[in-house]
Amino acid sequence: MIDSHQLALFVPVIVVMVLLPGPDVLFVLAQSARGGARDGILAMLGITSAFFFVHVAGAALGISALIVKSVFLFSVLKYAGAAYLIYLGVKTLLKRKESGDFASSETSRRTSTRPFAQGFITNVLNPKVAIFMLAFLPQFVMLNHGSVAVQILELGAIWGVAGAIALSLVAFAGGSFALLRSRSERIQRLERYITGAIFVSLGLRVAIPDRR
C-alpha cells in the first residue's frame, strides 16, 4: 500500500505530466474538434482503458518489461502503432464531404463508438508508454511497503485518473470548436486537414526514434 509520503512525491509530478501536451492530448483534441465533446470523451475512455488494463497491468505483472527487452516485439508494436496513426491521418485527409443532411450525420456520430476503439488501439500500440512507465513508476515504489505489484497498480491508477480528468477537459474544449465547425464548410475542410496532419505527425513521432 502506498502512503502519504509516496503520494506527496508522486502527485505533484503526475499533475505536471498530465498538463503537458502529448500524443494523447493531441489525439483527444483532434477527435473532439471533429466530432464534438462526445467523441473526445470516448477517445479518452479508450486511451484510459488501454492505460489501465494493458500498460499498468502489464507493468505490474512484468509483461511490459519482457516486451521492452525484446527488440522484435518492441519493433512490431512500435511500427504497427505508427502505421495505424498514419492510416487514420491519410484516411481523414482523403475523406470527402459527408453526404446527407447535418442531422443525419449527427445521428450517425452519436451512435458510433469508433473514437473509443481508435483511442484504445493507439495507446496499446505505443510501446513508449510501457517504456516510460517502467522507468518512472519504480522510482516511487518502496520495497518495505508491501507488494511491488500492488504499489504499481495503485500508482498507475492515480496516474490514470489524473490523465482522464485532464483529457476530459481537452475533450470539452475541442467540443466547443465542433459547434463552430458545423456551421462552416470552410472550417470543416480546415479541420479535416489539421486533424489528418496531427494523426500523421503522431504516427511519425512514434516511428522515428528519439535522438537524445
Image (tube, rainbow, N blue to C red):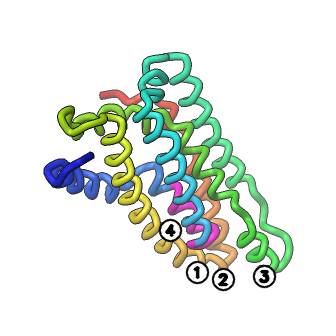
Residue where numbered disc 2 is placed: 183
Which amino acid type corresponds to the residue marked 1 in the rendered image? Leu
Residue where numbered disc 3 is placed: 103
Secondary structure of residue under mark 4: helix
Q: Please say if the residues under marks 2 and 4 sit with CB atoms less than 8 Å apart.
A: no
Nearer to us of marks 2 and 3 is 3
Which amino acid type corresponds to the residue marked 2 in the rendered image? Arg
Q: Real-space Cα distance between discs 2 and 3?
A: 12 Å
Give the residue displayed 48% in from the left and 46% down from the top. Answer: 51
Magenta extent: 27-37
Q: Please say if the residues under marks 1 and 2 sit with CB atoms less than 8 Å apart.
A: yes
Which sits in the foreground, 5 or 65? 5
Query: Of marks 2 and 3, which one's residue comes earlier in the chain?
Result: 3
Give the residue displayed 55% in from the left and 40% down from the top. Answer: 124
Secondary structure of residue under mark 1: helix
Q: Real-space Cα distance between discs 1 and 3?
A: 15 Å
Residue where numbered disc 4 is placed: 171
Which amino acid type corresponds to the residue marked 3 in the rendered image? Ala
Quadrant containing the C terminus is top left
Q: Give the left or right position of residue 55, taking residue 212 as reference.
A: right
Which sits in the foreground, 157 or 134? 157
Q: Real-space Cα distance between discs 4 and 1?
A: 15 Å
Secondary structure of residue under mark 2: loop
Residue where numbered disc 1 is placed: 180
Q: Give the left or right position of residue 90, taking residue 30 as reference.
A: right
Crowd tier of the residue under label 4, counting other residues whose Cα lies within 10 Å: few below 14, some 14–19, many 20 or above? many
Query: Of marks 4 and 1, which one's residue comes earlier in the chain?
Result: 4
Give the residue displayed 66% in from the left and 48% down from the top. Answer: 88
Crowd tier of the residue under label 1, counting other residues whose Cα lies within 10 Å: few below 14, some 14–19, many 20 or above? few
Crowd tier of the residue under label 3, counting other residues whose Cα lies within 10 Å: few below 14, some 14–19, many 20 or above? few
